[in-house]
Amino acid sequence: MDNQKDIDQIKGSEQLSANLSSNRFISENPLKESGTEKTDINTINQPIGNILVVDDNPQNLRLLIAILSMRGYKVRPAPSGALALQSALSILPDLILLDIMMPEMDGYEVCQKLKESELTKDIPVIFISAIDATSDKVKAFELGAVDYITKPFQTDEILARVNTHISLRKTQKLLEEEIERRKEYEEELKSISLSYQKMATQDFLTGVSNRRHFIERAEEELSRAKRYNHSLNFMMMDIDHFKNINDTYGHQAGDQILKNVALTCLDNLRVHDLFGRIGGEEFSALLVETSFNDALLVAERIRKSVEESTWHIDNKAVNCTISIGMSELNIKMEHLNENDDSFSIEDNLLYAANKDSQTLDKLMNKADEALYLAKSSGRNCIKYR
Ligand code: GH3
Ligand code: MG
Ligand code: MG
């Protein structure tokens, strides 16, 4: 028997007889019996840690239980590897003291199984064994043990190591909880910032880009088009006699029509094109890398789709049309060809000045003028400047 000397020593010094004679392994907290400890009602009622002690030798079990419960730990015994695994899974302990040499399933196997399970892998394991060979200690650490105590052990050593690992585990748990809390907080911040971003860039009614966002993006696309000499076309759409729709079907029906027209326009544009709500019943589109003729086809497709759509709102069939004004970014000046050898410095300056003069404001104003023309030409049509 490995610990007979220790047992005798502790029996004498710590008056364990009462605990040991009763066959209860989970002892009452005996702090109040200790002359050196402060009697604190909170510490008595709350164990400072939950320890699973695994040993096939009942006397060893009783001894360890006695030592640990004297210090306020709640101790559970397991006389075999299989029962240890069962017990660890039913109530997760804060620490496991694990004997190595046990019949059927030895401590190494128990440790391996504990480390394989997601539930028990983080529970610190201290091996407690009479084997003193370095190779066994190395094996224990390789299997994930946090410490190794050699039998026969000293009470103070057991308590010091157990205290250390219980504290480390508690700190680790607190850190993990803190990390989890921070992750949740970061997720919350992300979703708040995302909704602010949406509010700042989206039109609240239709969900398409709002005026500011559309213009910001359009400025970027315009400077890209100018830099790479890409063609670019601008469209201004306005619902015809929208006031009549509001007056006839009500403001809510009007809102629904605004959403439907926005969706119809989007359906007929490519993902790279920009689209946004510019004002009350006015929308704009910027068609990137699109020739004027192709842009005209798109405009006609949008106009026709809106004209042919019938939306049912409050059991009423509602139709509407839109007028479209278009303008084109005109980088190439007909009489100039930058690849031509005769392209002089003056021509170059003229070419650059022409590019500079093509601002988004100008494109929008030209499209607006074209839209005005479309309205005065009977509406439901496309004009360009
Ligand atoms: P036109 O063909 O000349 O464009 O005539 P219109 O009636 O469409 O133009 P007008 O500028 O006279 O009227 C625009 C109407 O759009 C008036 C305004 O109440 C309505 N409107 C603006 N914003 C909204 C909105 O968010 N929801 C609804 N339901 N109506 C809106
Ligand atoms: Mg209108
Ligand atoms: Mg208008």
Image (cartoon, rainbow, N blue to C red):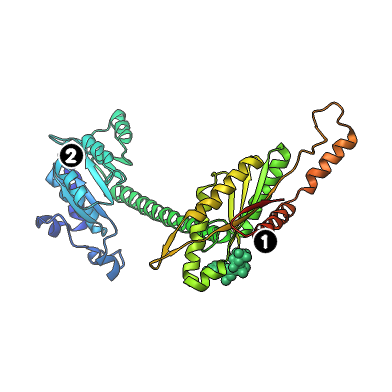
The yes-or-no answer for disc 2 within 8 Å of ligand 1 is no
- Name the residue: 72% across, 37% down: 229
- 1 vs 2, front mark: 1
Type of amino acid at the residue the image marks with label 2: Asp
Residue nearer the viewer, 136 or 225: 225
Q: In which quarter of the view is residue 54 placed?
A: top left
- Name the residue: 72% across, 56% down: 365
Dot 2: within a 10 Å radius of its alpha carbon, few (fewer than 14), some, or many (20 or more) residues? some
Q: Secondary structure at mark 1?
A: helix
Say if residue 270 shows up in the picture: yes
Type of amino acid at the residue the image marks with label 1: Ser
Q: CA distance from mark 1 to mark 2?
A: 107 Å
Residue nearer the viewer, 33 or 178: 178
Residue 175 placed where, x, y %?
Answer: 41, 53
Q: In which quarter of the view is residue 343 placed?
A: top right
Q: In the image, is 95 to the left or to the right of 198?
A: left
Q: In the image, is 114 to the left or to the right of 173?
A: left
- Name the residue: 9% across, 57% down: 22
Q: Secondary structure at mark 2?
A: loop
Q: Residue 275 has which mark?
A: none
Residue nearer the viewer, 379 or 24: 379
Say if residue 8 shows up in the picture: no
**Residue 148, placed above or below residue 18:** above
Residue under circle 1? 376
Residue 253 placed where, x, y %?
Answer: 47, 68
Dot 1: within a 10 Å radius of its alpha carbon, few (fewer than 14), some, or many (20 or more) residues? few
Q: Residue 2 has which mark?
A: 2
The yes-or-no answer for disc 1 within 8 Å of ligand 1 is no
